[in-house]
Image (spheres, rainbow, N blue to C red):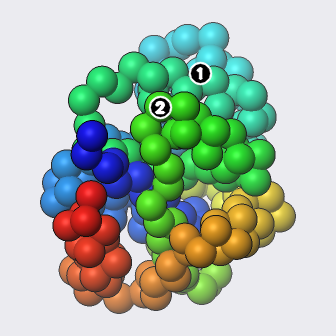
Amino acid sequence: MQKLLNIVLFGPPGAGKGTQSERVISRYHLTHISTGDLFRKHLGEGTVLGLEAQRYMDHGKLVPDEIVIGMVEEKINSTADTNGFIFDGFPRTVLQAKVLDKLLKLAKGSISVMILLKVPEDELKSRLRLRAKISGRTDDQDEGKIQTRITEYKDKTLPVASYYNQQEKLVTIDGVGSMDEIFSKVCTVLDPLYESS
Ligand code: AMP
């Protein structure tokens, strides 16, 4: 069986995960799992899961692990034919990362690499302020929520980078520069993995 290319695209809010994911998907034909997008979809459809998640998203807090994990498990298990997955905004806690390893082991292999997009905090804040004007995302439109999301990232999400570092799967990329420059660095990491998959 062909080896799957499973990538975690990682970084704080505003690091450019969504933008780079789109490019990665079209170049490597991967299945996108963005937990933020999935929650917003549920919310738009008014599902129970969406309404539950909204209670946390509205405050810039992380949605509880059991809710996120159930949603991701369902998505992985319902994807039949794929070259692999790109996880965008997931895992955001060490528990999520551990469960993801187990889920992939059962079904699709393992994480090939985690790419961390590194961006200084001032730059993140100005990007989020700019995105607020275009995206209509309520969590981008409030300084307090932006700060909470950055604090949640530092407290609960950043330890996930150490988790993958211990597995020698962490690659850090400078996330400041043009989209093309950053994508070309992402490709330098992914091309060899794609060729060997
Ligand atoms: P994002 O679109 O990735 O910025 O996510 C928007 C919001 O969805 C976050 O601020 C969290 O409230 C929630 N969220 C998305 N992914 C996760 C996750 N993996 N764990 C917990 N909460 C999440």
- Dot 2 alpha-carbon crowd within 10 angstroms: few under 14, some 14 to 19, many 20 or more: few
Q: How far apart are marks 1 and 2 (CA)?
A: 26 Å
Say which element carries label 2. helix
Q: Is residue 61 visible?
A: no
Which disc number belongs to residue 107? 2
Residue 148 lies, with reference to residue 62, above or below; the image says: below
Residue wearing tag 1: 50
Q: Position of residue 49 (x, y in %)?
A: 62, 17
- Tell me what residue is drawn at x 31 percent, y 68 percent: 193
Residue 125 is left or right of residue 154, and the answer is left
Which disc number belongs to residue 170? none
Residue 54 lies, with reference to residue 51, above or below; the image says: below
Dots 1, 2 in contact, CB < 8 A:
no
Q: Say how many tags the image has.
A: 2
Q: Which of marks 1 and 2 is nearer the N terminus?
A: 1
Residue 162 lies, with reference to residue 85, above or below; the image says: below
Query: What amino acid is labelled 2 in the image?
Result: Ala
